[in-house]
Every structure is written in structure tokens, then in C-alpha cells.
Image (cartoon, grey):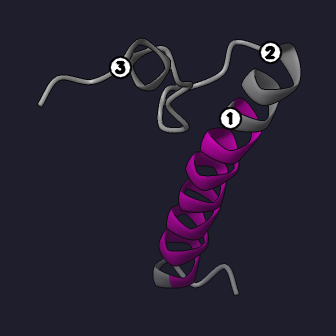
Amino acid sequence: MTKTHTKIGARNPFIPSYSPVCQLADWLLLSSVVLSGLVGGLAAIARQIGAF
């Protein structure tokens, strides 16, 4: 059975939005993960060399 035109044109919630607010939120989420990984790595290295 084929889809009707309204079902084909329905908005897919899994397609990223292009609004500036959503893009900023995506960037903040990604950068916070990267930043926390870098800080954790630096803390582990500093602990190994006896800085703490």
C-alpha cells in the first residue's frame, strides 16, 4: 500500500533542524563532551607525574 501525500510530507523528527538555537545547542553539547574528555585526560596525566 502506498503512502498518501500527507504521510510523505510529514516532518521527520530525526532530521536535524537548521534553526540557530538548535545549531548552538548541538555545538555546545559536542564541545562539552570534547572539553570534558580533554580535562579528564590532562588530570590523569598530571596525576601520573605527581602534580596533585
Q: Please give the name of the residue rendered at 56% of the width and 83% of the height, measured from the top-left corner.
A: 47
Residue 18 lies left or right of residue 9; in this view the side is right
Mark 2 lies on residue: 19
Question: Foreground mark, 3 or 1?
Answer: 3
Residue nearest the viewer, comparing 37 with 1 = 1
Q: Please give the name of the residue rendered at 65% of the width and 49% of the height, measured from the top-left corner.
A: 35
Asked which secondary structure carries label 1, the reply is helix
Mark 1 lies on residue: 26
Q: Please give the name of the residue rendered at 48% of the width and 14% of the height, measured from the top-left corner.
A: 9
Category of crowding for the residue at label 3, using alpha-carbon neighbours closer than 10 angstroms: few (below 14), some (14–19), many (at least 20): few
From which residue to which does the magenta span run?
27-47
Asked which secondary structure carries label 2, the reply is loop
Q: Residue furthest right?
A: 21
Mark 3 lies on residue: 4
Q: Position of residue 15 (x, y in %)?
A: 49, 26
The secondary structure making up most of the magenta span is: helix
Is label 3 in contact with label 1 (beta carbons under 8 Å)? no
